Image (cartoon, helix red, strand yellow):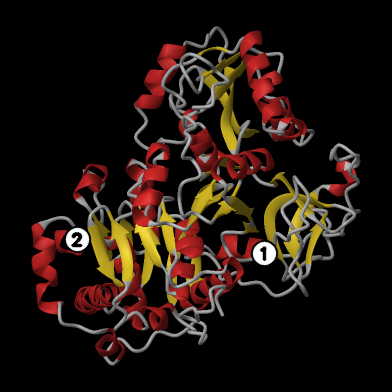
Amino acid sequence: MAPNGTSARGSSGAATVAELVRAQWGDHRVGVMHGDLVLTHHELAGGAAARAALLGDLLPRDAPPHLGVLLGNVPEYPLWLSAAALAGAAVAGINPTRRGPELARDIRHTDCALLITERAQLPLLAGLGLPLPPERILVVDDPAHRELLGPYKGATPDEIAAGGTGTPTPASRMLLYFTSGSTGAPKAAVCTQGRLAAAGHSLAGYLGVRRDDVHYLCMPMFHGNAVIAGWAPALAGGAAVALRRRFSASAFLPDVRRYGATYFTYVGRAVQYLLATPPAPDDRDHPLRRGFGTEAGTVDAARFAERFGVRLTEGYGSSEGGAAIQRTPDTPPGAIGRDAPGGELAVVDPETGAELPRGVLDPAGRLLNGERAIGELVNRGRSSFEGYWRNPGATAARTRGRGEGRVGAGWYWTGDLFFRDTEGFFHFVGRTDDRLRVDSENLAAAMIENILARYAPAAGVAVYAVPDPVAGDQVMAALALRDGAAFDPDDFVAFLAAQPDLGTKMAPRFVRTMAALPVTATHKVHRVALRRAGFRCPDPVWWSPVTAADPAAPARCAVPAGSAYRPFTAADRTALLALYRAHDRTALLDR
């Protein structure tokens, strides 16, 4: 039972997303809100059925039933998710911050037979040479789209289930969502209808979702966070959703009040952006009860609760479903939480698979034995990992053993560094590979390196993460300059602007110039040394300040990285380190 005594829809244990969508039929309560548009659950189910019927006619029979969705957070997004569920098709969330060949690669890699988009995104597709005829690129805000749907308007969910496509099963692919890879292009993680429905049920119960709740979806729906932690529990619990096309800190509270939102999901720096808005006397005048997400940080979570009166619940779950940590009421500051009852999570040596000693903390919460306690988080039990689309090597790497004895074969290796304290709480430290997480976007260092390698004055390039003072990472690049070359900031900015495949989050925030890159005994770039030195290195460092006026100002989204560079001065360093201390993240600089 939900906390208010009403049964949450989905408590019957629907095993597929299609069943949850069909359960909306006949429910005339509000289901989705976006601006002035309001749709009931019944209308959502009917709209999904019409689109599913259209899919039945448009999807080729000799190809995987995949459709790419390149949309902002508009009602068409949940409509097409629901349609895909009814039709037994899979949605590939296409990231609009990708550009040029990399955007085209994502669409091709996921074998999208259809692309659902809108007029605002069409410039991104110009000149890409996609292997899709015009009739398979559906522009949802074009009048032709309404005409295309016209003949299918009378379809019902039950008619779709009885049609020729067959009834979807828990094993039917539902989502292909991208997560970064350390050696190249992003990998498309598979999520089946069974896993997504189970996640919806689980979170609806954990979060106490009620039928009169409104989930505010302001994080992009091409990410797993908004779909798995926002849309799915609303669907399973019978709640409504309110959509914001893209996140806006200034519009957050007005939207919450307008829609009566009671719950929201967040990732990374969204919480910090909200805290950067000017305080107002009515900051607590809203119906919001809870936020759920990752990377808010202990300091900002406490500040958010104090200012807005809303508790943030931090969680950890690998995008691929291989491991999850539950936050309990007794979780101490700085920790993520404990293993689930009966779980088999462990922190092990990434090379040998041997379990490591527990981390010992001093009274101030500082780790005393990091060299012995920090290792890779693994799931030694059953996991929900369902593999990567068309990437058997990456799939195998997640579960293969380590060392000569292949210790850990069959475990799920998260690729994330943790330690476990003496009380059994897990603490996140970083990432084992060369992944970066910038503004809630997962990036691969190798991809950025391949782009920066085109910069003529550089003989060598290394890209790595430095911790952001608030949440996630920032991109730092080390450039080994050719003999006689000097770093010209204006020339570098022009170079970045000319790269068609440089995504909006890929430009370096910091650039270190040096004579040669450091290497290990095996002549590999010594990334650990580069990462630990960060911007505190002896070589010249150039940076794109996050604000033009004050490098430590809270409104940190003002100036995109790569728009201008200037020398990183001692005063800049002092101000930036103060920001790390203010957010209790100084220790991350030494890990």
Q: Amino acid at mark 2?
A: Leu
Residue 78 position (above or below residue 291): below
Compute the Cα span from label 1 to label 2: 36 Å
Q: Quadrant of residue 126?
A: top left
Badge 2 element: strand
Q: Secondary structure at mark 1?
A: loop
In the image, taking residue 214 as reference, residue 508 lies left or right, namely right
Residue at 15% x, 82% y is 154
Q: What is the x, y in percent for residue 254?
A: 37, 44
Residue 242, located in which quarter of the rendered image? Answer: bottom left
Q: Position of residue 156 (x, y in %)?
A: 23, 84
Q: Amino acid at mark 1?
A: Ala
Instruction: Name the spot of residue 107 as percent of width and height, x first.
Output: 34, 56
Q: Is residue 424 visible?
A: yes
Front-most of 32 and 334?
A: 32
**Residue at coordinates 17% horizontally, 55% vertically from top-left?**
141
Please give the residue where the numbered disc 1 appears in the rendered image: 323
Q: Is residue 95 visible?
A: no
Q: Earlier in the sequence, mark 1 or mark 2?
A: 2
User: Would you say 504 lies left or right of 67 here?
Assistant: right
- Does 483 sit above or below residue 268? above
Location of mark 2 (residue) = 138
Q: Considering the image in quadrants, where does the N terminus appear?
A: bottom right
On the image, the x and y values in percent for residue 323 come to: 67, 64
